[in-house]
Image: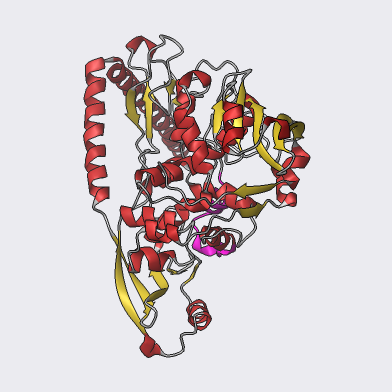
């Protein structure tokens, strides 16, 4: 009897201990919640916390500007060309992150480099310039223009752990309303400070940086070793791969090769990205010979690059309901399109190219159609052994990149997906519609008519603009004819996109 009583007593003691721990834990969480609530409701303490955050961020940015990655490269003594480089996850992660960068960010980086323009994306620069020059009143919100000129990366905070970061957009930086009365739970955050609070109408200009832990490797496993060829093919660091590259380049004598150490910083990473659009040997041009991109540009012809979109792939991604009416003004004698008159739906489609990740466009292209070799990087990720990557998600982010929430719109003809961001106790407002009304709409107000030239310069319609374009093309008014076309699923899947490689600088 005493033995049974003792067992019951022990069991009851364990139950009471568990209950006590549960109550203690709940009280602790409640106290923590009240403390955080009090801190963020107190303007002084809130600004103090944000001040400390800002100092840490500035220190981190200063450190990143001087950070370098040293890599060993095998070089052909004869022609002074890189055969391949050996790298761990640090540089390979940076290289693979190119595929997640939006086109608008790449163009912005090119403009910041002065005359160093990535000509391989040609008249996409004219689209970017059209957004810069267009009056903000044509956009649904001021933030819509910011979305196109400084698009966010759909990979989000995943890129925070990169050793070398390019671009001026911190993936963990958001903005909130500074008005204390507007602070609710969940907190409302914005990508841009130009977004206006739906409660008080003030700009959401108070910075808030999310705390994200650093990881050992972003896409590639921490201990993985890989080799990178001069034309940006990434392969496992095995004998068969290195031997294949040596034989491909005709290197048979070990006396003709040497090992060199290359130091790579942020400037080299940016130049390498730009060079990859116009050169088949970017490692040699940028890291070994330090050739200015302006000199490489002189060797690029003005012929258009035809980029065929796979019908089968587009068939899977385009939206069935997307039908856009376009009015073409043609020259009967020259048999060319002088310009087009289009509604905001077509211009929304054109402008949306600026927010598309590079990997999404490369996914649609036929290998070898670009003048550079950036498409080799995409193909390498497709072929890379899953054992070398951190997870299936890591590969999915690269070969099938998505847009951040709010950057896509309903019935987009290309049907790109939207990434899922989860921020504890917070929600991100749609920059196109901060109030939540008319979500999933485009960037421009409507109805509106725009003029689009053949090299993708977009302007609001004007009675003098059309005759001015015809005059520059030496096309008399009597030589033109109008043709109305419908752009839908069938047209998107069968149309050949021409990316014009014009020998012009980013201005």
Q: Position of residue 295 (x, y in %)?
A: 38, 60
- Provide the major secondary structure of the magenta segment: helix
Q: Is residue 380 left or right of residue 261?
A: right
Give the magenta part as a residue range: 383-401
Residue at x 40% of width, y 9% of height = 200
Quadrant of residue 471 within the rendered picture? top right
Q: Position of residue 43 (x, y in %)?
A: 26, 16
Residue at x 49% of width, y 56% of height = 277
Which residue is more in the foreground, 20 or 413? 413
Quadrant of residue 142 within the rendered picture? top left
Relative to 241, does residue 308 appear above or below in the rendering?
above
Q: Is residue 17 left or right of residue 309?
A: left
Q: Position of residue 269 (x, y in %)?
A: 37, 55
Q: Position of residue 275 (x, y in %)?
A: 43, 58
User: Is residue 370 among the parts visible in the rendering?
Assistant: yes
Which residue is more in the foreground, 270 or 96? 270
């Amino acid at each position: 009897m005493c033995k049974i009583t003792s067992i019951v007593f022990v069991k009851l003691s364990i139950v009471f201990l568990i209950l006590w721990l549960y109550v203690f834990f709940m009280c602790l969480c409640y106290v923590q919640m009240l403390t955080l609530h009090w801190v963020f409701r107190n303007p002084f303490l809130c600004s103090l916390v944000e001040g400390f955050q800002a100092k840490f961020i500035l220190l981190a940015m200063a450190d990143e500007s001087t950070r370098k990655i040293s890599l060993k490269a095998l070089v052909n003594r004869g022609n002074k060309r890189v055969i391949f480089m050996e790298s761990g996850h640090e540089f390979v992660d940076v290289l693979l992150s190119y595929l997640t960068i939006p086109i608008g960010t790449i163009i912005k980086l090119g403009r910041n480099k002065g005359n160093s323009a990535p000509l391989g994306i040609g008249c996409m620069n004219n689209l970017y310039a059209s957004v810069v020059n267009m009056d903000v009143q044509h956009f649904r919100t001021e933030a819509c223009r910011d979305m196109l000129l400084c698009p966010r990366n759909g990979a989000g905070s995943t890129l925070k752990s990169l050793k070398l970061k390019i671009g001026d957009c911190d993936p963990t930086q958001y903005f909130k309303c500074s008005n204390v009365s507007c602070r609710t739970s969940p907190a409302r955050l914005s990508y841009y400070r130009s977004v206006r609070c739906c409660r008080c109408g003030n700009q959401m200009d108070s910075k808030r940086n999310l705390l994200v832990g650093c990881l050992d490797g972003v896409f590639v496993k921490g201990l993985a070793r890989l080799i990178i060829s001069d034309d940006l093919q990434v392969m496992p660091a095995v004998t068969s791969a290195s031997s294949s590259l040596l034989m491909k380049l005709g290197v048979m004598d070990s006396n003709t090769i040497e090992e060199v150490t290359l130091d790579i910083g942020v400037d080299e990473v940016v130049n390498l990205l730009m060079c990859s659009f116009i050169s088949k040997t970017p490692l040699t041009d940028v890291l070994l010979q330090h050739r200015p991109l302006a000199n490489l540009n002189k060797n690029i012809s003005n012929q258009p690059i035809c980029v065929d979109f796979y019908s089968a792939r587009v068939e899977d991604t385009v939206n069935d309901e997307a039908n856009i009416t376009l009015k073409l003004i043609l020259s009967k004698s020259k048999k060319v399109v002088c310009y087009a008159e289009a509604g905001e739906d077509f211009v929304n489609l054109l402008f949306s190219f600026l927010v598309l990740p590079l990997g999404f466009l490369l996914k649609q292209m036929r290998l070898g159609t670009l003048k550079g070799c950036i498409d080799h990087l995409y193909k390498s990720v497709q072929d890379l052994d899953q054992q070398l990557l951190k997870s299936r998600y890591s590969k999915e982010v690269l070969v099938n990149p998505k847009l951040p929430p709010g950057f896509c719109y309903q019935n987009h003809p290309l049907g790109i997906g939207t990434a899922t961001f989860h921020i504890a106790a917070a929600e991100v407002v749609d920059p196109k519609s901060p109030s939540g009304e008319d979500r999933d709409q485009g960037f421009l107000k409507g109805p509106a008519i725009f003029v689009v030239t053949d090299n993708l310069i977009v302007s609001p319609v004007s009675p003098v603009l059309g005759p001015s374009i015809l005059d520059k093309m030496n096309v008399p008014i009597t030589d033109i004819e109008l043709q109305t076309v419908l752009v839908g699923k069938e047209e998107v899947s069968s149309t050949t996109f021409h990316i014009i490689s014009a020998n012009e600088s980013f201005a």
